[in-house]
């Protein structure tokens, strides 16, 4: 399962979390990978977060600055991918909750 969105100009941080659907807590097992990808086919992909979701850890907190990766270029996309875990594919959806892309820089 993969979803993508074009990042806005000036994107600087990503905050939120990924969570297994409530019905999947008992049986679910997957790996969530969050990355920034280039619009150029075969272009670079920069992983910014990764975590395993299962009964012990049903949520993945995502709080990362994007500047340390080299600021996103125009057309770069945010990609969230869900891969099967050690016990096979997850039997339900992964939900992205309270995801926010911040733009600009914080004032000191």
Image: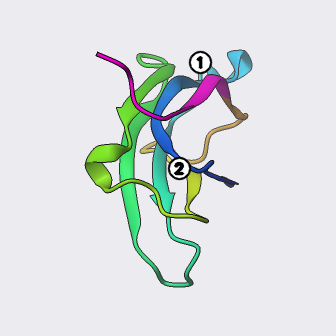
| Side of 74 relative to 44 (left or right) | right
| Side of 48 relative to 8 (left or right) | left
Residue at disc 2, secondary structure: strand
Residue at disc 1, secondary structure: loop
**Where residue 63 sits: x, y (%)?**
40, 26
In reply to whether residue 81 is colored magenta, the answer given is no
Towards the viewer: 29 or 49: 49
Please give the range of residues in magenta: 96-108
Residue 93, quarter of the rendered image: top right
- Tag shown at residue 84: 2
Query: Closer to the N terminus: mark 1 or mark 2?
Result: 1
Label 1 packing within 10 angstroms: few (<14), some (14-19), many (20+): few
**Where residue 5 sits: x, y (%)?**
68, 52
In reply to whether residue 104 is colored magenta, the answer given is yes
**Where residue 94 sits: x, y (%)?**
66, 33
Q: Disc 1 versus disc 2: distance between alpha carbons?
A: 15 Å
Nearest to viewer (mark 1 / mark 2): 2
At horizontal 46% and vertical 47% (from top left) the residue drawn is 33
- Tag shown at residue 26: 1
Label 2 packing within 10 angstroms: few (<14), some (14-19), many (20+): some
Towards the viewer: 9 or 19: 9
- In the figure, 46 relative to 102: above or below? below
Tell me the quarter of the image containing the C terminus.
Answer: top left
| Visible residue check, residue 1 | no
| Visible residue check, residue 13 | yes
**Where residue 95 sits: x, y (%)?**
68, 28
- In the figure, 108 relative to 78: above or below? above
Q: Main secondary structure of the magenta part?
A: strand
At horizontal 33% and vertical 45% (from top left) the residue drawn is 67
| Side of 91 relative to 13 (left or right) | right
At horizontal 51% and vertical 35% (from top left) the residue drawn is 29
């Amino acid at each position: 399962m993969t979803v993508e969105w074009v990042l806005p100009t000036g994107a600087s941080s990503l905050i939120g979390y990924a969570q297994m659907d409530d019905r999947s807590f008992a049986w679910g097992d997957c790996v969530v990978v969050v990355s920034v990808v280039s619009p150029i086919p075969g272009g670079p992909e920069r992983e910014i977060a990764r975590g395993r979701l299962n009964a012990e850890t049903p949520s993945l907190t995502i709080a990362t600055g994007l500047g340390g990766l080299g600021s996103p270029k125009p057309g770069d996309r945010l990609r969230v991918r869900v891969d099967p875990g050690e016990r096979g594919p997850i039997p339900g959806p992964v939900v992205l909750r309270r995801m926010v892309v911040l733009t600009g820089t914080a004032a000191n």
